[in-house]
Amino acid sequence: MDIIVNGIKLNYEVFGEGIPLILLHGNRESHEIFLPLIEQLKSSFKIYAVDSRNHGKSEYTKKFNYEIMAKDIYEFIIKLELKGASIVGFSDGAIIGLHLALKDSKILNKLVLLGVNVTPKGLEKAFYDAYKNDLDPYNQMMFKQKPIRGKDLNKITNDTLIVYGEHDVITRQQQLRIYKNIRNSKYISLIGEDHASYILKPDKLHKLIYDFISIT
């Protein structure tokens, strides 16, 4: 399905019935990365799986960054009357979720942030050094992102679940900084997992999301 928001066309798919849940994928991906997770959640949630601007089947534009993409999702929520939906964001999708909560926390219910960082310096050094000077626009978006400060994270009032893999590319220091600055947050590190492995094989993840979103 397509919808016009913020002057562009976004592609999205809807699965299941129940509590509304919006899924936001990571860099260079599409909503299809979530298909294994969707299979395990669609019996309990009405899932809106979105292709972000410049990804998947959504429209491609010259300019794109996390703030613009958050505005896309804000208008998506307004247009489809999804106020009160929860967000599950992975990597860049989690950054978009943070910007959305900072823009208007009341439009959301809960946040699930998977493998999120709030500054490029929160990436492991080997990963940072390998890509920091890459001129690819998708890498530039990651490495030119404006840091989200601790005092901004303090403003987020939504119940928030923060999940990382034990071997994530996000530093432990960054993980704990985010957790400590979001007041109503819960932190989980999944043993044996890396940045994306628990998304692709979500046997551990789906129950965490179900339990967190379902509890009122």
Image (cartoon, rainbow, N blue to C red):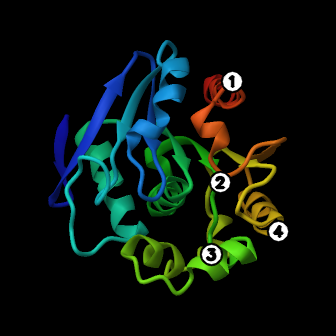
Q: Residues within 10 Å of mark 2 (few under 14, many from 20)?
A: many
**Residue 13 position in % (x across, y down):** 30, 31
Identify the amino acid type marked 4: Gln
Direction from residue 167 to residue 99 in the image, left or right: left
Quickly name the residue at label 3: 119
| Picture quadrant of residue 132 | bottom right
Asked if 6 appears above or below 83 in the picture, the reply is below
Quickly name the residue at label 4: 173
Disc 2 and disc 1 in contact, CB within 8 angstroms: no
Q: Is residue 150 visible?
A: no
Residue at position x 62%, y 23% from top? 214
Identify the amino acid type marked 2: Gly
The dot on residue 207 is 1
The secondary structure type at the circle numbered 4 is helix
Query: In the picture, which quadrant includes the C terminus?
Result: top right
Query: Residue reaching furthest bottom?
Result: 133
The dot on residue 193 is none
Among the two numbered marks 3 and 1 on one chain, the one whose residue lies closer to the N terminus: 3
Among the two numbered marks 2 and 4 on one chain, the one whose residue lies closer to the N terminus: 2
**Residue 47 position in % (x across, y down):** 41, 28
Direction from residue 19 to residue 55 in the image, left or right: left
| Picture quadrant of residue 8 | bottom left
Q: Residues within 10 Å of mark 3 (few under 14, many from 20)?
A: some
Residue at position x 44%, y 74% from top? 141
The secondary structure type at the circle numbered 3 is loop
